[in-house]
Amino acid sequence: MVAPSTKCFLVTGPPGVGKTTLVMKVLESLRASYLNLKAQGEIRQGMERVGFEVVTLDGRKAPLASTTISSRAESQRWPSVGRFKVDITSFESLALPELQVKEDTDLFIIDEVGKMELFSSSFFPAVLRVLESNIPILATIPIPKFGRDIPEVARMRNHPGAAIFTINTRNGEAVKEQIYTQLIDVLRRT
């Protein structure tokens, strides 16, 4: 069982294993249990291997990263992760307002705190404000590469109120139930 002080639920696992799907299923289950649940945050969705979008929980979308850039000037000024160019301005315009701490928020969702998102110098400070707010947070983080975490991710992983859940191709449903049950307990106490 989760410690009473746990308010930060971090889902990790290899790329493509279902971290985003798991988070969305937990959110669906929570909304079915708490009809007035006030969740805010953002989800990262793939776009047919040509890029990623940032999507708010109310369905607004903006580009996060793409392999298709409209101009050479944009291509040169945008940072890269593999073959993807990261559109920081687009990401920040949609994601940062979603990470503003509001008193009536019951739960924050952040998918994901990874290399693309961390190109934004404003993103991680916003994540830290959420962590310090005492509002429960459900976030995805990348699995450490070569045994080394991105420093910001290591900071989240080592946060005193963090519980880490590792998902693989066989345990997704069990991990979903575990997180859902523990979040229900946290929401009842707040």
Image (tube, grey):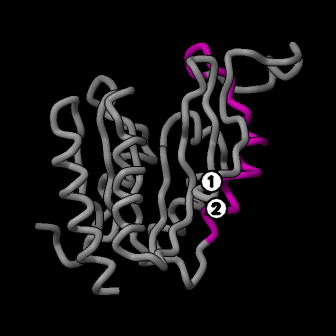
Report the residue marked by disc 1: 56
Q: How far from the left and from the top, in percent, is residue 133? A: 48, 76
Q: Is residue 59 left or right of residue 7?
A: right
Mark 2 surroundings within 10 Å by alpha-carbon count, few (fewer than 14), some (14 through 19), many (20 or more): many
The residue under the point 25% across, 51% down is 176
Q: Does the magenta stretch include residue 86?
A: yes
Report the residue marked by disc 2: 98
Q: Which of 23 and 92 is in front in this view?
A: 23
Between discs 2 and 1, the one toward the N terminus: 1
Q: In which quarter of the image is the N terminus?
A: bottom left
Q: In this view, does 188 lie to the left or right of 111?
A: left
Identify the disc placed on residue 124. Answer: none
Secondary structure under the numbered disc 1 in the rendered image? strand
Residue type at mark 1 is: Thr
Mark 1 surroundings within 10 Å by alpha-carbon count, few (fewer than 14), some (14 through 19), many (20 or more): many
Residue type at mark 2 is: Glu
Q: Quadrant of the C terminus?
A: bottom left
- How far is disc 2 from disc 1 in space, using C-alphas? 7 Å
Q: How far from the left and from the top, in percent, is residue 49? A: 56, 17
* The residue stretch that appears in magenta: 81-100
Q: How far from the left and from the top, in percent, is residue 119? A: 63, 38
Question: Does residue 55 lie above or below 150 as drawn?
Answer: below
Dot 2 and dot 1 residues touching (CB under 8 Å): yes
Q: Is residue 2 left or right of residue 34?
A: left
